[in-house]
Image (spheres, rainbow, N blue to C red):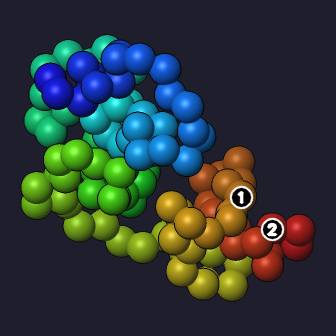
Amino acid sequence: MVCAAVLSNGPVVSKSSCLVKHSRFTLCAAHHTEEHGGDWKSCEVCPKTWPLEMYVWYGTNKWNFEKLENPPSYEPTHCGACGRVIVLSKDGYSVNPDGSHRCMDCWEH
């Protein structure tokens, strides 16, 4: 497990380093931290841990040493008030108790 070996070797100096980004924003690191066991790319627990959109992002973003092959498709997340598409990995939003999402323009209403 190359990623686990990299994560455990030595101090990290910069909060913007690739290693810090990898350890915070990838499935590989989350899988290792949560001690799921086995290979992160075939883990059955990881896809159930986050909304599918975030699972795909965590597995395919630029901070991965290896990317998730053939990520599953998903329906985009929409604001429950105005219908605008919310990109969970970059847009601000809130989640209501009923599970619906609100974009930043609608969250106060």
Residue 68 pos. (x, y %): 17, 51
Q: Quadrant of residue 37?
A: top left
Q: Residue at x 23, y 67 (%)?
A: 73
The numbered dot on residue 94 is 1
Q: Residue at x 33, y 59 (%)?
A: 62
Look at the numbered discs 2 and 1 and tell me whether their residues touch, using CB distance below 8 Å. Answer: yes
The numbered dot on residue 107 is 2
Mark 2 / mark 1, whichever is N-terminal: 1
Residue 46 pos. (x, y %): 30, 35
Relative height, residue 103 to residue 28 (above, below): below
Relative height, residue 42 to residue 106 (above, below): above
Helix, strand or loop at disc 1? strand
Q: Mark 2 is on which residue type? A: Trp
**Residue 100 shown left or right of residue 9 in the figure:** right
Q: Residue at x 35, y 31 (%)?
A: 29
**Residue 89 shown left or right of residue 5 in the figure:** right
**Residue 70 shown left or right of residue 52 in the figure:** left
Which quadrant of the figure contains the C terminus? bottom right
Q: Quadrant of residue 72?
A: bottom left
Q: Mark 1 is on which residue type? A: Ser
